[in-house]
C-alpha cells in the first residue's frame, strides 16, 4: 500500500498559496472576467408572483429592443410558478442596459394564485397548497429505539427545549453564472462551479449534445458552499441564448437573484427532550423537527443532501429515543446542499439541550460532553481545547456575571466524513528541461487545490513548489470529482501523488538515474531527450481516510440593555488527518468559523407573508459578518499524518453557532432559543419586549 | 436603470432650471443610484451639484460653523476641530455606512436620503410610500420600523446626521424658488410626519446648500445600537447635547432616530432637565417622557428598551468633555 513520504519538506509546511499573487492583483480570471470574442450579456426574467399560472409569455417586443440578439423561454407552454423569482425567460444583448430594457418589454399573462411563504402558516390546514397533489406538511419519518416513554421515568433529570434556526442563503461572493459558447464546434462553458464535470454532463443532457462535445472550464471561482453543482437553470438558458444568437453569452446572476433561486439552508423547528442519570449518562431522547426546503429539496445533493432532516441526537448515543421529522413546503426557492448539510442546526439544537442538562445536573458542560461523547478524538480535543481556551477560569454558573455587559462561554462538538473519491485521476508531465506540469480536472473552490498539488509534487521530486505548474478546472484534463462533502483534498492529493511517484519511477528507469530527486533532477530530465514523460495517476487506498472530529469553544459578551452580542474568542481544535498545506487549511477553519458566526448572529432570509417576496435580497439587510464582528480565532490542528488526507471544509463550520449560542445562554442565564440571535431576540429572551416606558 | 440625461450645475441658481420637471440632484449618489437601479426612482435628468462653488467646506466662525452640503461624511468624521466642538456630530458621522461610503456620501445627501424600509426598497412592492395604498410593514415584518408616526407609513428617518444636528439646534439653508430659506431640523422633516409619500419637507427643486451649527458651548454625544458592530443601520440612534456645569445640565436636548419618520424630540423631556443634576435617575425620567407615547408593532417593541439605554448612555457621556 502506498504511503506519504516520511520526509516532508513542503507537505504540512506554511508555504504560501500558489495563486495568492494573481488573486490579489486581479490577474486571476474568474468566470465573470472571461470575455470571448463577440460575447453578449444575458439576463433572466423572473416571476414577480409568488405563485401564478403562466398563460402566455410574449417575447416579440423584447426582441425588437435595440441591441437584443436573442430571447428564449425558460419553459414552453402553460405552467405554474411556485415562488417569487422563478425563471420565466431570458434575453441576450449587446449591453446590460439593452437586456434590462428587454426584460421590461416582455409581456407575461398570468393568473395569480394563493401562496404561502412561512412555515408556521404553511403547515396549518387549509393553507394554500404549494403542490396541489399533496399537503404542505409531509408525513413524519419516525426513528425509534428502546422504550423512550419508560426511559424518561427512569431519569434523574429531564430537560426540554424548543429551538429554531432560520433559512440561511449561500451568497458566495461570486454569484452563480456561466459564459457559454454553443456553435457547430460544440459547447464551451466557463462556469463558476464546484464541479466542472457535473456542468458538462448537465449541459450535455439538457442540450442533447454528446458529452465529448462539451468542454467546461473553471480557472478560478469565488465560492459555492454547496450551491454550485451542475449548470443550473441559468446555465441552460445561457447555452440556448448562445445558440439562438450565434455568439457567446455571459449570464451571471445578480446579488438580488442569489437571494431567490439558487439554494439555501433549510430552517428548523426543533422540539427536544433529553433525560439522563444523575452522573450525566444520557438515557432518553425525544426529538420532533420540521423545517422548510422551499418548494422542494433541490437538485443538488452532493455533500450529504439538502433535505430538512437533521441528525438527531447528532454525535451522541442515547439508548432510548424517538425521532420524528417532517418537511413543510412553502412558495420559496429550493434548498441546496449548504456547507455541512443538516449539521449546524443539528449541532445547535443538540448542544443547547446538552447545556440545559448540564445546568440541571449541576455538571460542568465540558465534563458532561467528555462523559457522553463516543469519539475518543473529540474527548481528547475537549481536554486540549479547554486547557488552551482557559475554560476552567472562564466558566461560571449561568447568569452570574455581574454588570450590564455580561460575558459567557460555551462549547460544542462536530463530526464529518471528508474521505476521497476513488475515481479521481491526475497526470504528471516531466519535461526534458526539468519543469513539471501536473493536471487534474477538478476545480478549486478557493480552498487552495493548486497549492496542495504543488506541495505534493515538490516533495515527491525534491523540487520547490514554484517549479511545478498545476493545471486544473477543465474537463479536458483527467477526471476530478465534484467538490462536495469536503472530498476534494482527499481525492486529488492521492491521485496527484500517485501520478508523481509513478513519473519519478519511470524517469529513473528510463534514464538509469537511481535517485533523480533534488540535485539530480535536471541531469536526469535532460536524459529524456526531446519527449516529455507523461504519467497518469489515480486515487490510491491508504493515502486518505474519512471521519473527523472537532470541538469549538466560544467566549461572548452580551449587552443586556441593547441585546448586542459580540464574540470575543473562538478556539477550534480540529482533526483532519495529514495536514498538506497548513496556511490554506487554517484559512478554511477561519472561513468556517466566520460562516458559523453569521449563522449564529446575523443571517436570515426574511419573507413577507402578504406579498410573498424576499424582503432582504441584498447585503444591506441580509447581514454578513464583517471585520469588526470578528473575534480572536485560535486554531489547533491535530496533525495525524498516519491517517492520510481528510477534508476540513465542512466540519469546521458545524459547532460554531452551537458554541456561541451556549456562550450567550451562559452569559444571560436564559436561553435565546432562535438563530440568528439578533438584539430583538436577545431582549425578548430577557423579557425586555418593550412595555410602557 | 432608465436612460437619463446628465447636466452639471455651475451655480445654485442654474441648478433648478437644469432639473426640469422630473430631474434629481446628484451629489455622492449613494442613495439616489440605489433607487435608480431598483427602478424606484426614474429621473430623466441628473443634475450634478458637486461642482457648485463653496459647498465643500467647513467654515469655523466664532458664533456659527457652516458645513457645505457637499462636504463628505468622511471629512466630518476626520475633522479634528469638530471632534472637539461637536463630538456628537462627529460620532454620528463615524457610524454612517462604511468608510468607502463615507468617502463619497455627502452631508446634503445624508439629510435628504430616502426611506430604507425594505418594502419601499423592494422593486416589486408598491407600498404606501411609493404611491400604493398599503403600508405592508404594519401587518408584516417591522423589526426595523417606527414607534411613532403621524400617518400610516411607519418607515423611520435614518439619517444619523439629522439626529445629531437636531440636538445641536442646527439649521439647514435650502434654496427654494430662487430664495434662501432657513429650516430647523424639525422643519426639514416635518412633512414626513403627516405625509406617507414624503421622506422630508424638501419640494422638487429645493436644494440643500449648507448646515449652520451655532457655537453654544454645549457638549454633545451620539450613540446607536445596531445588529452588527460596523457598516449597519441603527436600530435606534440617540443624540444628546447640553451645557454641563459642575454636576448640573442646562439647555439639554435628547433626540432619537430610526424610531419615527422624523427625528424624535419631546420638548417636555428637555425642559425637565433644565438645571437638574445630571445622573441616571434623571436620564430614566427623561427616557420615560421621550418614549411615553410609543406605539410598538408586532416586531419592534424591543426598540423601546434600547432607546431607554441609549438615552441614559448619551446623557452620561455629556459628563465627560471630548
Image (cartoon, rainbow, N blue to C red):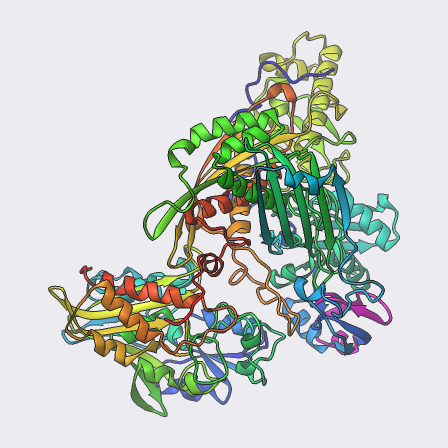
Locate the C terminus of chain A by quadrant. Answer: bottom left
Left or right of A246 on screen, residue B51: left
Q: Position of residue B116 (x, y in %)?
A: 49, 71
The N terminus of chain A sits in image quarter = top right
Q: Is residue A61 magenta?
A: yes
Disc count in the image?
Answer: 0
Q: Residue at x 76, y 70 (%)?
A: A126
Confirm whether residue A629 shows in the render.
Answer: yes
Q: Position of residue B146 (x, y in %)?
A: 45, 74
**Which image quadrant is residue A38 in?**
bottom right
In the image, B275 versus B227, the foreground residue is: B275
**Residue at (80%, 68%) from the top-left corner?**
A73
User: Residue A650: x, y in percent?
Assistant: 62, 39
**Magenta-tinted stretch:** A59-86
Q: In the rendered view, would you say B260 is above or below A316?
A: below
Say which residue appears at 81% left-offset and 51% top-offset.
Answer: A203
Judged left or right of residue A614, residue A307 is right
**Residue A601 position within the rendered picture, expressed as x and y whole percent measured from the top left:** 50, 52
Q: Name the image quarter holding residue A652.
A: top right
Residue sitting at x 88%, y 47%:
A210
Amino acid at each position: 500500500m502506498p504511503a506519504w513520504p516520511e520526509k516532508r519538506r513542503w507537505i504540512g509546511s506554511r508555504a504560501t498559496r500558489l495563486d495568492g499573487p494573481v488573486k490579489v492583483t486581479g490577474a486571476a480570471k474568474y468566470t465573470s472576467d472571461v470575455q470571448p470574442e463577440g460575447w453578449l450579456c444575458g439576463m433572466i426574467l423572473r416571476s414577480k408572483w409568488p405563485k401564478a399560472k403562466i398563460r402566455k409569455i410574449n417575447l416579440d417586443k423584447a426582441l425588437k429592443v435595440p441591441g437584443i440578439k436573442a430571447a428564449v423561454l425558460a419553459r414552453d407552454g402553460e405552467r405554474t410558478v411556485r415562488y417569487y423569482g422563478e425563471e420565466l425567460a431570458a434575453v441576450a444583448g449587446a449591453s446590460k442596459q439593452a437586456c434590462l430594457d428587454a426584460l421590461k418589454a416582455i409581456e407575461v399573462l398570468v393568473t395569480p394564485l394563493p401562496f404561502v411563504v412561512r412555515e408556521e402558516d404553511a403547515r396549518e390546514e387549509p393553507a394554500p397548497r404549494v403542490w396541489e397533489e399533496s399537503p404542505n406538511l409531509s408525513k413524519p419519518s419516525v426513528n425509534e429505539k428502546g422504550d423512550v416513554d419508560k426511559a424518561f421515568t427512569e431519569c434523574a433529570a429531564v430537560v426540554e427545549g424548543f429551538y429554531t434556526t432560520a433559512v440561511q442563503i449561500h451568497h458566495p461572493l461570486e454569484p452563480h453564472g456561466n459564459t457559454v459558447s454553443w456553435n457547430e464546434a460544440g459547447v464551451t462553458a466557463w462556469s463558476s462551479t464546484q464541479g466542472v464535470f457535473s456542468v458538462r454532463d448537465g449541459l450535455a443532457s439538457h442540450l442533447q449534445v454528446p458529452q465529448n462535445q462539451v468542454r467546461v472550464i473553471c480557472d478560478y471561482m469565488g465560492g459555492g458552499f454547496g450551491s454550485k453543482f451542475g449548470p443550473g437553470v441559468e446555465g441552460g438558458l445561457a447555452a440556448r441564448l448562445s445558440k439562438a444568437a450565434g455568439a457567446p453569452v455571459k449570464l451571471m446572476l445578480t446579488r438580488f437573484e442569489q437571494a431567490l433561486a439558487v439554494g439555501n439552508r433549510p430552517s428548523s423547528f426543533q422540539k427536544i427532550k433529553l433525560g439522563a442519570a444523575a452522573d450525566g449518562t444520557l438515557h432518553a431522547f425525544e426529538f420532533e423537527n420540521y423545517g422548510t426546503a422551499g418548494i422542494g429539496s433541490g437538485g443538488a445533493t452532493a455533500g450529504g443532501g439538502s433535505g430538512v432532516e437533521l441528525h438527531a441526537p447528532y454525535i451522541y448515543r442515547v439508548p432510548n429515543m424517538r425521532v420524528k421529522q417532517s418537511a413543510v413546503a412553502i412558495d420559496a426557492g429550493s434548498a441546496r446542499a449548504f456547507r455541512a448539510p443538516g449539521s449546524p442546526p443539528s449541532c445547535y439544537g443538540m448542544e443547547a439541550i446538552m447545556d440545559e442538562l448540564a445546568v440541571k445536573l449541576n455538571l460542568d458542560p465540558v465534563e458532561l460532553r467528555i462523559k457522553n461523547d463516543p469519539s475518543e478524538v473529540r474527548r481528547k480535543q475537549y481536554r486540549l481545547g479547554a486547557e488552551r481556551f482557559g475554560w476552567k477560569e472562564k466558566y461560571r454558573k449561568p447568569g452570574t456575571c455581574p454588570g450590564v455587559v455580561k460575558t459567557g462561554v460555551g462549547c460544542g462538538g462536530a463530526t464529518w466524513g471528508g474521505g476521497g473519491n476513488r475515481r479521481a485521476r491526475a497526470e504528471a508531465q516531466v519535461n526534458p528541461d526539468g519543469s513539471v506540469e501536473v493536471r487534474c480536472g477538478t476545480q478549486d473552490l478557493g480552498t487552495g487545490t493548486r497549492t496542495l498539488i504543488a506541495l505534493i509534487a515538490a516533495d515527491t521530486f525534491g523540487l520547490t513548489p514554484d517549479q511545478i505548474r498545476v493545471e486544473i478546472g477543465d474537463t479536458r484534463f483527467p477526471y476530478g470529482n465534484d467538490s462536495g462533502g469536503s472530498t476534494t483534498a482527499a481525492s486529488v492529493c492521492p491521485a496527484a501523488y500517485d501520478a508523481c511517484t509513478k513519473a519519478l519511477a519511470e524517469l529513473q528507469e528510463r534514464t538509469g538515474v537511481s535517485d533523480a530527486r533534488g540535485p539530480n533532477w535536471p541531469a536526469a530530465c535532460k536524459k529524456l531527450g526531446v519527449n516529455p514523460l507523461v504519467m497518469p495517476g489515480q486515487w490510491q487506498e491508504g493515502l486518505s481516510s474519512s471521519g473527523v472530529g472537532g470541538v469549538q469553544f466560544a467566549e461572548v459578551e452580551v449587552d443586556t440593555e441593547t441585546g448586542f452580542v459580540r464574540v470575543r474568542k473562538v478556539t477550534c481544535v480540529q482533526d483532519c488527518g495529514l495536514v498538506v498545506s497548513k496556511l490554506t487549511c487554517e484559512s478554511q477553519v477561519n472561513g468556517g468559523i466566520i460562516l458559523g458566526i453569521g449563522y449564529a448572529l446575523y443571517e436570515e432570509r426574511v419573507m413577507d407573508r402578504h406579498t410573498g417576496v424576499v424582503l432582504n435580497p441584498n447585503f444591506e439587510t441580509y447581514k454578513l459578518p464583517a471585520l469588526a464582528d470578528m473575534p480572536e480565532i485560535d486554531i489547533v490542528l491535530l496533525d495525524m499524518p498516519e491517517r492520510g488526507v481528510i477534508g476540513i471544509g465542512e466540519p469546521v463550520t458545524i459547532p460554531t453557532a452551537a458554541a456561541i449560542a451556549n456562550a450567550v445562554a451562559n452569559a444571560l442565564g436564559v436561553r435565546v432559543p432562535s438563530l440568528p440571535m439578533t438584539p430583538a431576540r436577545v431582549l425578548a429572551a430577557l423579557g425586555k419586549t418593550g412595555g410602557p416606558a | 436603470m432608465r436612460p437619463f440625461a446628465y447636466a452639471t450645475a455651475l451655480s445654485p441658481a442654474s441648478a433648478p432650471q437644469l432639473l426640469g420637471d422630473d430631474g434629481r440632484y446628484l451629489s455622492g449618489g449613494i442613495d439616489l443610484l440605489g433607487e435608480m437601479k431598483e427602478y424606484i426612482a426614474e429621473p430623466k435628468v441628473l443634475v450634478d451639484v458637486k461642482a457648485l462653488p463653496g459647498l465643500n467646506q467647513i467654515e469655523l466662525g466664532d458664533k456659527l460653523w457652516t458645513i457645505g452640503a457637499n462636504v463628505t461624511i468622511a471629512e466630518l468624521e476626520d475633522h479634528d476641530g469638530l471632534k472637539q466642538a461637536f463630538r456628537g456630530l462627529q460620532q454620528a458621522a463615524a457610524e454612517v455606512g462604511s468608510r468607502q461610503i463615507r468617502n463619497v456620501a455627502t452631508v446634503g445627501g445624508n439629510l435628504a436620503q430616502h426611506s430604507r424600509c425594505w418594502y419601499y426598497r423592494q422593486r416589486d412592492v408598491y407600498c404606501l410610500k411609493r404611491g400604493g395604498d398599503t403600508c405592508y410593514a404594519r401587518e408584516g415584518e417591522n423589526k426595523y420600523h417606527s414607534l411613532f408616526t403621524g400617518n400610516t407609513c411607519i418607515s423611520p428617518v435614518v439619517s444619523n446626521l439629522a439626529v445629531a444636528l437636531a440636538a445641536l439646534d442646527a439649521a439647514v439653508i435650502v434654496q427654494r424658488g430662487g430664495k434662501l430659506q432657513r429650516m430647523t431640523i424639525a422643519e426639514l422633516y416635518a412633512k414626513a410626519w403627516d405625509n406617507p409619500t414624503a421622506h422630508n419637507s424638501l419640494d422638487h427643486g429645493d436644494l440643500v446648500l449648507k448646515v449652520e451649527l451655532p457655537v453654544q458651548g454645549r457638549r454633545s454625544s451620539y450613540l446607536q445600537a445596531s445588529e452588527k458592530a460596523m457598516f449597519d443601520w441603527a436600530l435606534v440612534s440617540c443624540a444628546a447635547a447640553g451645557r454641563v456645569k459642575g454636576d448640573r445640565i442646562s439647555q439639554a436636548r435628547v433626540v432619537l432616530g430610526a424610531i419615527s419618520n422624523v427625528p424624535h424630540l419631546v420638548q417636555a423631556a428637555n425642559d425637565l432637565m433644565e438645571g437638574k443634576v445630571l445622573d441616571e435617575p434623571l436620564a430614566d425620567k427623561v427616557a420615560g417622557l421621550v418614549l411615553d407615547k410609543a406605539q410598538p408593532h408586532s416586531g419592534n417593541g424591543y426598540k423601546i428598551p434600547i432607546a431607554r439605554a441609549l438615552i441614559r448612555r448619551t446623557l452620561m457621556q455629556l459628563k465627560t468633555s471630548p
